[in-house]
Amino acid sequence: MIKWALIFLVVGLVLGALGFGGLGGAFVGIAKFLFFVALALFVLFLVLGTVAAKKIT
């Protein structure tokens, strides 16, 4: 998911540099959304992994 966020970020920056500000802003917004979803999933799985590891040992 981070890979897609980086792709959308680069495409958004290129579109913004070429003068397509509205479309570039939309791509950057999608990149921010994907980044925060990936970050939330990472934290969720980190917590679930530590809880499961404590129950095993």
Image (cartoon, grey):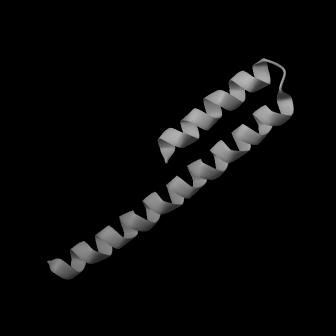
Q: Is 25 on the left-hand or right-hand side of 2? A: right
Residue 48's place in the image compared with 17, above or below, is below
Q: Identify whether 41 is placed above or below 29.
A: below
Q: Is residue 11 left or right of residue 46?
A: right
Q: Percent position (x, y) of residue 26?
A: 77, 41
The percent position of residue 15, horizontal first and vertical second, equals: 75, 25
Residue pictured at 59% horizontal, 50% vertical: 34
Asked which quadrant contains residue 52, the reply is bottom left
Query: Which of 53/1 is in front?
Result: 1
Q: Where 28 falls versus 51 (above or below)?
A: above
- Would residue 27 appear left or right of 19 to someone viewing this image? left
Task: Identify the residue at image location x=45%, y=67%.
Answer: 44
Query: Horizontally, is 10 left or right of 55 in the view?
Result: right
At 77% across and 32% down in the image, what residue appears?
Answer: 24
Quarter of the figure that contains the C terminus = bottom left
Q: Position of residue 55 (x, y in %)?
A: 22, 82
Q: Which residue is rendered at x = 71% and y = 39% of the image?
A: 27
- Residue sticking out furthest to the top: 18
Q: Residue furthest bottom?
A: 55
What percent of the width, then of the height, locates residue 13?
70, 26
Q: Nearer the viewer, residue 20 or 6?
A: 20
